[in-house]
Amino acid sequence: MDSVSVRNWTVDTTDDTPLLGEGETHPAQRMPFTDWLAALPQAAAILTCDDSGIASINGNLPFRTAFGEPADRRQTNKPATEWRDRVIAFVQSGRASDSFEMRREGKLGPEYFLCTIGRLPDRQGMKAQYLFTAIDRTTERTIEKNLRRELLSDGLTALPNRTGFGEEIDDRIANSAWPDSAQFGIIAIDLSRFSRVNESLGPMAGDELLITVAKRLKSSLRQGDVLARIGGNDFAIFARLNNGLSDALHIVQRIRESMSMPIRLSDLQIRVDCAIGCALSINQDDDPDDVVRKAQAAVKIAKRTGKVEIYRNGVLKEAQRRFSIESRLRDALARGGLTLAYQPLIHLPTGEITGFEALARWEDEELGFVSPAEFIAVAEESGLITPLGRWAAYEAAQALSRWDAKFGQPLSVGVNVNLSPIQMARDDVASMFEEALRYSGVAGHRLTAEITESAIVADPDKARKLLVALKDLQMPIAMDDFGTGYSNLASLHSLPIDILKIDRSFVTSMLEDHDKQVIVRTILSLAESLNLKVTAEGIETQQLAHALQQMGCWQGQGYYFAKAMTEAEAYDYWRARWNFETI
């Protein structure tokens, strides 16, 4: 191809004549409204409005198809619909434009349109005209509805989830006929030992179990009741109660009957036990979410008692306080907000201090002083008992190390550290004590582990292995609260236990209660035959101290000698009594 130089192009000259104005530009290309509307993919029409109604001057095919309005035909003889009412309201408002969504029933179900209406420029001698458009949003709304259904329902059981449960309750309360005396109740159901099914048979079996349970629970419902899965193995039922608690207990009975037969999973038959808690509204204006929380608080108690529990006033406040304690305790453990107090252990024959029992104490900025019985129970329930127990062991060993440094040589005292059964089950306790002793440089015989009978009963083999590991560290073992649990002679004989601690419930009123005195004598006799030492808790008077001394009790602790004290006070107390003191 030959190249052409632009220098050889001819250039036409221009004049100064202006282009035609807006009204005269391309006059031959003007198109009627009908052609413009036909080019739009959505329904569109030019409307007029007067006292006789709405008329469509021009409307495209989507408009005529969707709204059934033939072009150039007045609709005064047709019943008014929502969109006409909205157009009339817009015309009367004087606004330049407006938009709204319209829903109507179609042949295949609900149809949704996003409608817009705007004023066209006024033309001299003509009625005011309005451009109306309607975009079909039925597909989008269907997708949104399906997504919302997925968000509000449980994918496994197809039941409402926690959010969907709340919406179902609101709908039932708002749109159902309620007698004046009627109230509603929430029945919360927790599947006991469900985690064991997952652990032993796998998650597929757990899912199959949940589906079967959901079907059985649904079969126990009355018409109008709502069943939901509000947690992993938690279900809840909303029920209208015409007869108050009587109706709720009737539903509970039906639930128990439906769950009485074993469930077959593969080749196994599994019996599912349920913890059931109920909460009743005072009237229909009660917040459903609040009633659900009350039912869940009741079911927590039912898990402990094994009975159907009805929510009592104050239970929810207790649950809220436990939650607050858990949150604050977690923070206190992270920033060192707890302390150890030390209660002396006294050798009854001589009055010498043989050691101290370390007791956790907590003074919180917001909660004030929190009882150990309260925060330790919360720690065990929440799993915080493991870091709490580790902190106590390390701190007790460090306290011994600091006392030794202050005195210039190792003291002739030790410290007892309590072990929770839950910590024994979840933590590597032997490793914890080994680290505590190694970090502090304290000999093992000066740190005594106090365990409870329940810890041994829960898993005897694991408890035996742990105690043997602690004995390898030269640590003494004390069985705390002896006499209140389920120990037998065989376990005492086979376990490497050194000390029995008689529970204070037997000691404190021993002089006034002959039966308790007999129990104390029996424990002392048993300990002597097994070559075990005995510590008596709860010694609060000199008479009790002398009586136990005469019975041959080795060691005691209680308010008669001293209350629990700080680390510095405990050291000073030991120094003051160091050179032998009789009771």
Image: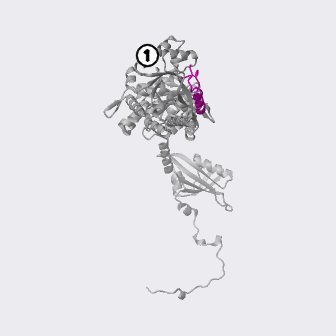
Horizontal placement of 20 versus 303: left or right? Answer: right
Instruction: Describe the colour scheme in one phrase.
Output: one colour
Please report the residue visible at 63 percent of the width from the left and 35 percent of the height from the top: 366
- In the image, which residues are magenta? 557-583
**Residue 190 place in picture, x, y as percent:** 46, 31
In the image, taking residue 227 as reference, residue 29 lies left or right, namely right
Indicate the position of residue 485 as horizontal and vertical percent values. Answer: 45, 22
Is 366 colored magenta in this rendering? no
Instruction: Give the residue number, with chain letter if any, for mark 1.
Output: 525
Secondary structure predominantly adopted by residues drawn in magenta = loop
Q: Quadrant of the C terminus?
A: top right
Q: Give the side of residue 568 with respect to residue 550, left or right.
A: right
| Relative depth, front residue between 18 and 180 | 180
Residue 109: in sight, yes or no?
no
- Relative to 232, does residue 451 appear above or below in the rendering? above
**Percent coordinates x, y for residue 131 in the rendering:** 60, 57
Amino acid beneath label 1: Ser
SS for tag 1?
Answer: helix
